[in-house]
């Protein structure tokens, strides 16, 4: 009985410093976003094109009456383009910008898993001059002998996509 109580308390303590991350693949690498930011996962559908948008903005989709911009993360991260396969999906996320919420879709190659990641598991990313700016990376976590790149989706959208969209409107 004491062992059970101790185990439950330990789990509660871990839960306080643990977040869940939805992971997905891009160009063979696994990335993760905090699951609290994920609204839904949709199958791939061609978005409606919009003029004067950044090249990585594919257009917009109708999400139950709400117009949602869709960005191609491969293009956003300057990765090689591929033909989207059967596993390609749109991960719809909620972000906050200037005190107001926004909904954005991100096209990814495939969804992987949901992992519990403790704060102590997150390591800072080294500055290696990679294809993804350090500003967008919250950190790296090793889970089941694989490295997962954890994205700061608010920064990626707010400082990246929305800033570029504002530049295109000028």
Image: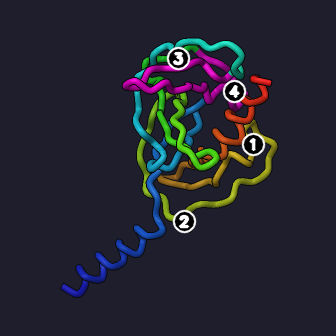
Q: Which colour style is shown?
A: rainbow
Q: Looking at the image, tell me whether mark 4 or mark 2 is earlier in sequence order.
A: 4
* Residue found at x 76% / y 40%: 130
Q: Looking at the image, tell me whether mark 3 or mark 1 is earlier in sequence order.
A: 3
As measured in the structure, the alpha-carbon distance from the residue carrying label 3 to the one carrying label 1 is 24 Å
Mark 1 secondary-structure assignment: loop
Which residue is under mark 3? 84
Q: Residue 102 placed where, x, y %? A: 54, 38
Quadrant hosting residue 163:
top right
Which residue is under mark 1? 133
User: In this orientation, does residue 137 appear?
Assistant: yes
Q: Nearer the viewer, residue 117 or 17?
A: 17
* Dot in front, 1 or 4: 1
Which residue is under mark 2? 119
Q: Looking at the image, tell me whether mark 2 or mark 3 is earlier in sequence order.
A: 3
Q: Nearer the viewer, residue 46 or 133?
A: 46
As measured in the structure, the alpha-carbon distance from the residue carrying label 4 to the one carrying label 2 is 29 Å
Q: Residue 110 placed where, x, y %? A: 47, 30
Q: Crowding near pointer 2: few (<14 within 10 Å), some, many (20+)?
A: few
As measured in the structure, the alpha-carbon distance from the residue carrying label 1 to the one carrying label 4 is 13 Å
Residue range highlighted in magenta = 56-82
Mark 3 secondary-structure assignment: loop
Q: In the shown orientation, is residue 1 left or right of residue 102?
A: left
Depicted 32 relative to depicted 16: above or below: above
């Amino acid at each position: 009985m004491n062992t059970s109580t101790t185990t439950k308390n330990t789990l509660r303590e871990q839960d306080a410093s643990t977040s869940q991350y939805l992971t997905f693949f891009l160009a063979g690498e696994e990335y993760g976003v905090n699951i609290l930011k994920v609204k839904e996962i949709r199958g791939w559908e061609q978005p409606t094109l919009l003029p004067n948008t950044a090249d990585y903005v594919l257009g917009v989709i109708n999400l139950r009456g709400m117009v949602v911009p869709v960005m191609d993360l491969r293009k956003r991260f300057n990765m090689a383009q591929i033909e989207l396969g059967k596993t390609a999906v749109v991960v719809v996320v909620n972000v906050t910008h200037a005190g107001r919420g926004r909904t954005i879709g991100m096209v990814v190659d495939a969804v992987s898993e949901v992992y519990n990641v403790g704060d102590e598991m997150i390591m800072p990313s080294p500055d290696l001059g990679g294809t993804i700016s350090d500003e967008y990376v919250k950190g790296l976590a090793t889970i089941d002998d694989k490295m997962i790149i954890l994205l700061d989706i608010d920064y990626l959208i707010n400082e990246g996509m929305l800033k570029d969209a504002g530049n295109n409107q000028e």
